[in-house]
Image: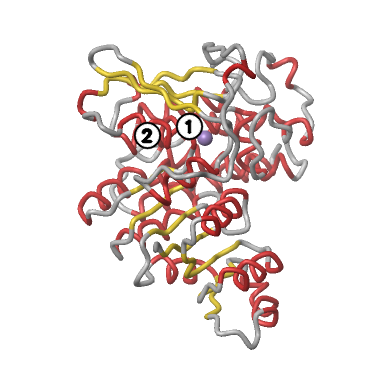
Amino acid sequence: MQTITILGSTGSIGTQALEVASKHNIRVKALAANSNVQLLSEQVIETGAEYACIFDESRLSQLESSLSGRNVQILTGMEGLKTIARLDGVDKMLNSVVGMVGLEPTLESIEAGTDIALANKETLVAGGELVMKRAAEKGVRIYPVDSEHSAIFQCLQGNKSSQMTKILLTASGGPFFKKTKADLKDVSVEQALSHPNWSMGNKITIDSATLMNKGLEFIEAMRLFDVSPEQIEIIVHRQSVVHSAVQYADFSVIAQMGVPDMKIPIQYALLYPERIECPTKELSLTDYGTLTFEKPDLETFDCLSACIKAAKAGGILPASVNAANEVAVRAFLDGKIKFLQIGELVTDVLNNTENRPCDSLKTVLDADLAAREYTRSKIENN
Ligand code: MN3
């Protein structure tokens, strides 16, 4: 029997992971959530978790009272996440928190020698070089949860990754596929939040609408699979059935397919290398009939081109564009800026940050903070 911990247990990935865990009798030792005390408490009681962490410290007493009388260790803040990340007797930590917050717990888990199921892409975007280097040194395995990266990982099984020559990274294209900048001028939050194929949290859904998500995934793929930007081709595939593919030196291309349901990659990351029944639906290719593949529109979607440029430049720029985007998406959701300004703000940070090598956690955190401050001041003077 496996034992796991989950950071981000009340989010979309976290709740689906708990469904998978319950189906396969995976023991859950600790759970952490950002602010949803109600659901976190229910999850802790249901799973019998020994540790519960609420990231938002202002809700600590609420969590304490809802779990009072139970034998549960209550934690809070970044220290709480890090405490969970270094717990003994854990086979895997699922990191599915949103944003840069995920980086330090990932590094903590690596230091503790605990394998990671990674759904927090910002970890690899901002601190990817550090994370992968340290994981290799400590012999810690990182199992991708992101559907595209899980697909690539699955396509690599039984083959030599040194013979992989290219990654075909698929993208749904989001709700604004084929739109021009003129069409997107007055997009509302509601329009941006309605994704055609995937049901996800707000941050990632906006990232999917701007194609920032694909830009982050581009960088994530470079780090996870140690390939150059030139070895990744982004392909818009509207049906989200092919979750990505890899090409080998003999020009054979292997793809992974399935219904668009995160439970498949979550389960693969948690139970690797087992392939047992998953609580999802069977893929019926004849129901789809046609699968389409097109080039992405780099002219309209500034976030994607900014990420590719940051990926090629390396250093701190991936962390900078990620930070600018986190601030810009928050401001868009709060009605402070327009949809297209997200891409403008991300590009602005890219063009106005002096690059330097990404050699320590402090360098990454400093770059992150500087880009956040820069972007906030741009929004205030808007
Ligand atoms: Mn994805």
Q: Counting other residues with Cα less than 10 Å from the Cα at mark 2, is it few (<14), some (14-19), or many (20 or more)?
A: many
Give left or right: position of 196 versus 323.
right
| Towards the viewer: 347 or 39 | 39
| Disc 2 element | helix
Task: Identify which amino acid the numbered label 1 is placed on.
Answer: Leu
Residue 154's disc is 2
Q: Residue at x 30, y 48 (%)?
A: 130
Which quadrant, please, contains the N terminus?
bottom left
Residue mark closest to the camera, 1 vs 2? 2
Task: Identify which amino acid the numbered label 2 is placed on.
Answer: Gln
Residue 307: x %, y % from top left: 47, 29
Residue 350's disc is 1
Residue 358: x %, y % from top left: 32, 44
Q: Quadrant of residue 72?
A: bottom right
Q: Residue at x 47, y 54 (%)?
A: 95
Q: Residue at x 60, y 84 (%)?
A: 70
| Disc 1 element | helix
Extreme residue toward the bottom, this view: 69
Give left or right: position of 204 versus 231.
right
Q: Residue at x 60, y 36 (%)?
A: 281
Q: Counting other residues with Cα less than 10 Å from the Cα at mark 1, is it few (<14), some (14-19), or many (20 or more)?
A: many
Which quadrant, please, contains the C terminus?
top right
Residue 306: x %, y % from top left: 49, 26
Give left or right: position of 308 versus 294.
left
Q: Distance between the Cα atoms at labels 1 and 2?
A: 33 Å
